[in-house]
Image: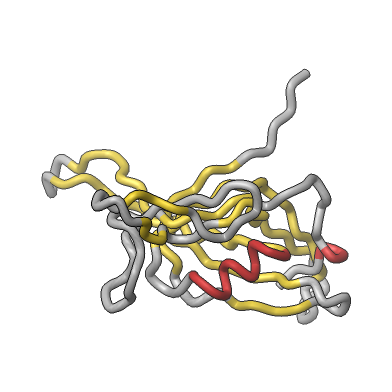
Amino acid sequence: MIEMNKVFLCGNLTADPDYRNTASGLGVASLRLAVNRRGRFDRETGQAQEETLFIDVTAWDKLADFSRNYLSKGRRIFVEGRLKMDQWQDKETGGNRSKITVVAERIQFADSKPQGEGGGAPGGGGRAEGGSSWGRADSGGGSQAREEPSYERQGTADNTEDDLPF
C-alpha cells in the first residue's frame, strides 16, 4: 500500500514570521499563510466566488532562519511540506483539542522582490540548491545578479523538538 503525506501551497503571508529558539537552541518559525481559491460561479452576481484558507506553517532550523531573515507580511511564497496533527488539552475547559498544521520542507518566493528593496532578479522565484541560501541568475548583460533566496531542508531528521504546539 502506498502512503503519502505531501502538501504544496502557494499564498501570501498574513504576518511577519514569529521566530523563536527552543530550549536546545534550535530555531523555529511560525508562519500564517492565506491561500485563495476561486470556487463556483454565482449566477446571481455573475462573479466567481472566492474562498480563503488560513493555514499555519512551521519552519525548523535553517528554514526558520531563512523565514526570519527574508520573509515578511504580504510576501507570496511557495511552501512544500507535510501535514502534522497537533493535539492538546484546552486549559479552560479541559477538553481535547487538535489542529492540522504544515511542517515546511521547502520554501521559496512566488513573487517579485517587494518595492523599495534593492537587488534581485526580475520575477523572483529563486531557489537554492545544495543548502546554499543564494542562487545566481544571468541578468542578460553578462554580469551576475543575485536571485531571491530560498531554502530547502536537508536530511531526513524530524526536527520537531518534542512537537510543541504554538
Foreground pick, 100 / 80: 80
Foreground pick, 46 / 18: 18
Report the quarter where the C terminus lies: bottom right
Compared across the picture, whether 46 is left or right of 97 comes to left
Residue 124 position, x and y percent, is: 36, 56
Q: How many marks?
A: 0
Quarter residue 4 falls in? top right
Compared across the picture, whether 75 is left or right of 93 comes to left
Residue 126 position, x and y percent, is: 44, 52
Compared across the picture, whether 146 is left or right of 133 comes to left
Quarter residue 13 falls in? bottom left
Q: Is residue 73 above or below residue 83?
A: below
Q: Residue at x 73, y 72 (%)?
A: 27
Foreground pick, 72 / 132: 132
Q: Residue at x 64, y 77 (%)?
A: 19
Compared across the picture, whether 75 is left or right of 29 comes to left
Q: Residue furthest top?
A: 1
Report the quarter where the N terminus lies: top right
Q: Residue at x 34, y 69 (%)?
A: 119
Q: Residue at x 65, y 53 (%)?
A: 131
Residue 50 position, x and y percent, is: 30, 51
Q: How is the image coloured?
A: secondary structure
Residue 147 position, x and y percent, is: 41, 58
Foreground pick, 166 / 103: 103
